[in-house]
């Protein structure tokens, strides 16, 4: 598995530092608010688990399972495979995403949550890939920007593999051009 990685973009320690910074920013910004952190499965798992431990506030957690990728390509069609267990009406929602790439999924979900009556909807992402944008999307909280390369690890996958790497790396093209 590690032999399929061309280069490491973010080490475990760099990820930890980014998450501490994001947690402090979110804690400051959401003082006194009714916060629900909504993770977009499956990629959000490591990031969201670490992030919520750095947010020093009362909060609730919920998940949406969504998909718009097939291998390394976006289909452009956002599918909700698992919906929220609670209402977001009148609540401040923070969507936790592993990577914002095309902007298609996150924009669709943000619109959906606002339609459902959320008081506010903001986005926190570990990785931002602005070069991949197909839709206008500007996350409020960004861990770091990454180049327009196919990245895996720390929740990010290629066909459900590589999520368990403790770092973020660029996948060698030979791993997906089979």
Image (tube, rainbow, N blue to C red):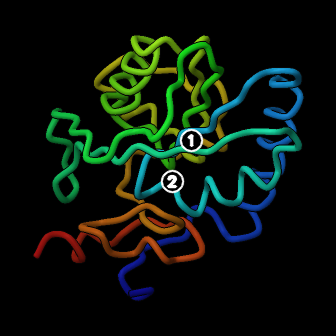
Give the x, y percent position of residue 177.
14, 70
The quadrant in which residue 29 appears is top right
* Quadrant position of the C terminus in the picture: bottom left
Give the x, y percent position of residue 107.
38, 22
The quadrant in which residue 49 appears is bottom right
Work out whether mark 1 precedes mark 2 in sequence or the reverse, and give the earlier one: 2
Residue under label 2: 44
Give the x, y percent position of residue 26.
79, 33
C-alpha separation, residue under disc 1 versus residue under disc 2: 6 Å
Q: Residues within 10 Å of mark 1 (few under 14, many from 20)?
A: many
Asked which secondary structure carries label 1, the reply is strand
Asked which secondary structure carries label 2, the reply is loop
Q: Residue at x 22, y 49 (%)?
A: 69
Q: Residue at x 61, y 31 (%)?
A: 94
Seen from the viewer's position, the closer of residues 51 and 127 is 51
Seen from the viewer's position, the closer of residues 101 and 8 is 101
Q: Is residue 148 left or right of residue 67?
A: right
Q: Residues within 10 Å of mark 2 (few under 14, many from 20)?
A: many
Seen from the viewer's position, the closer of residues 95 and 137 is 95
Seen from the viewer's position, the closer of residues 99 and 10 is 99
* Quadrant position of the N terminus in the picture: bottom left
Q: Is residue 123 above or below residue 155?
A: above
Q: Is residue 9 left or right of residue 3?
A: right
| Callout 1–callout 2 Cβ contact below 8 Å | yes
Label placed on residue 83: none
Give the x, y percent position of residue 144.
63, 43
In this view, the residue farthest toward the left is 178
Q: Residue at x 57, y 19 (%)?
A: 121
Label placed on residue 96: 1
């Amino acid at each position: 598995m590690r032999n399929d990685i061309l280069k490491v973009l973010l080490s475990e320690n760099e990820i930890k530092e980014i998450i501490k910074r994001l947690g402090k920013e979110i804690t400051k910004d959401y003082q006194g608010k009714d916060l629900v952190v909504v993770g977009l499965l499956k990629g959000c798992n490591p990031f969201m688990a670490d992030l919520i431990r750095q947010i020093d506030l009362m909060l609730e957690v919920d998940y949406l399972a969504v998909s718009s990728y097939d291998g390394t390509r976006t289909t452009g069609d956002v599918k909700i495979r698992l919906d929220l267990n609670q209402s977001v009406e009148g609540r401040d929602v923070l969507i936790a995403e592993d990577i914002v790439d095309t902007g298609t999924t996150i924009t669709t979900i943000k619109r959906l949550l606002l339609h459902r009556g959320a008081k506010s909807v903001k986005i926190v992402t570990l990785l931002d890939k602005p070069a991949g944008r197909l839709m206008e999307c500007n996350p409020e909280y960004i861990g770091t920007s990454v180049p327009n390369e196919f990245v895996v690890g720390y929740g990010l996958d290629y066909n459900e593999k590589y999520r368990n790497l403790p770092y973020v790396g660029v996948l060698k093209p030979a791993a997906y051009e089979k």
